[in-house]
Image (spheres, helix red, strand yellow):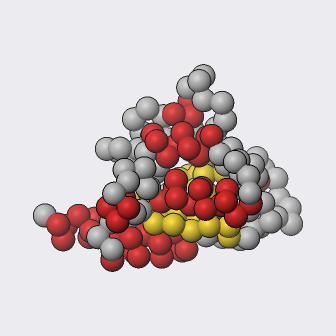
Amino acid sequence: MAASYSKALALGSVSKGGSPRLAARGISGSMSFRSHMHEALSEARAAASRGEVPVGAVVVGPDGAVLATAGNRTRELNDPTAHAEVLAIRAACAALGAERLPGCDLYVTLEPCPMCAAAISFARIARLYYGAADPKSGGVAQGPRLYSHAQCHHAPEVYDGINAAPSEALLRDFFRERR
């Protein structure tokens, strides 16, 4: 299901400047892969500083421009749907004046939960890049594996393990401080 960019990078089948999607198909070209995970990590750190679970998300347009960034705000907004992914998708849709985001990429520090995975599908996000796996609450590679169901009308290309170590460390440190 998910293509592991970090594994491909370690095996040498993808260069740091190359596109994992193209390299996975054996195609090289002038397109280059630029990760926006550092911006998602920045949003996750900001969420942690607000006392929110440290998850950050970035929506990138087809031209490579950042359309929206967000971090979790469930506690601040008293809204259980205010996950980073949902907030970033809402902001990107508002910025474009559209209900869907075809051709856009989403970077998120943690594997999306089932709710967010569904929102990603509904928004028609083209590619999903995420950092840490979420064995407890994930909805993409764990749990319900939403994109593998026939009822799923759109499944983005999924790339996992992008900056997984710093994403995992943020979460581990956040929860360690609260125990």
Q: Position of residue 40 (x, y in %)?
A: 52, 69
Does residue 9 appear in this view? Answer: no
Question: In which quadrant of the rendered view does residue 29 lie?
Answer: bottom right
Closer to the camera in the image, 117 or 135? 117
Closer to the camera in the image, 161 or 38? 38
Q: Residue furthest top?
A: 150
At 70% across and 47% down in the image, what residue appears? 100
Q: Position of residue 50 (x, y in %)?
A: 33, 74
When the figure is inspected, residue 116 is found, relative to residue 85, above or below; the finding is above
Tell me if 72 is positioned left or right of 123 in this view.
left
Quadrant in which the C terminus is drawn: bottom left
Q: Position of residue 160 (x, y in %)?
A: 53, 53
Closer to the camera in the image, 174 or 164? 174
Question: In which quadrant of the rendered view does residue 177 lie?
Answer: bottom left
Q: Position of residue 111 (x, y in %)?
A: 46, 51
Number of numbered labels in the structure image: 0
At 55% across and 74% down in the image, what residue appears? 39
Does residue 138 appear in this view? Answer: yes
Q: Residue furthest right?
A: 30
At 33% across and 77% down in the image, what residue appears? 49
At 44% across and 55% down in the image, what residue appears? 83
Tell me if 156 is positioned left or right of 175 in this view.
right
Quadrant in which the N terminus is drawn: top right
Question: In which quadrant of the rendered view does residue 75 lie?
Answer: bottom left
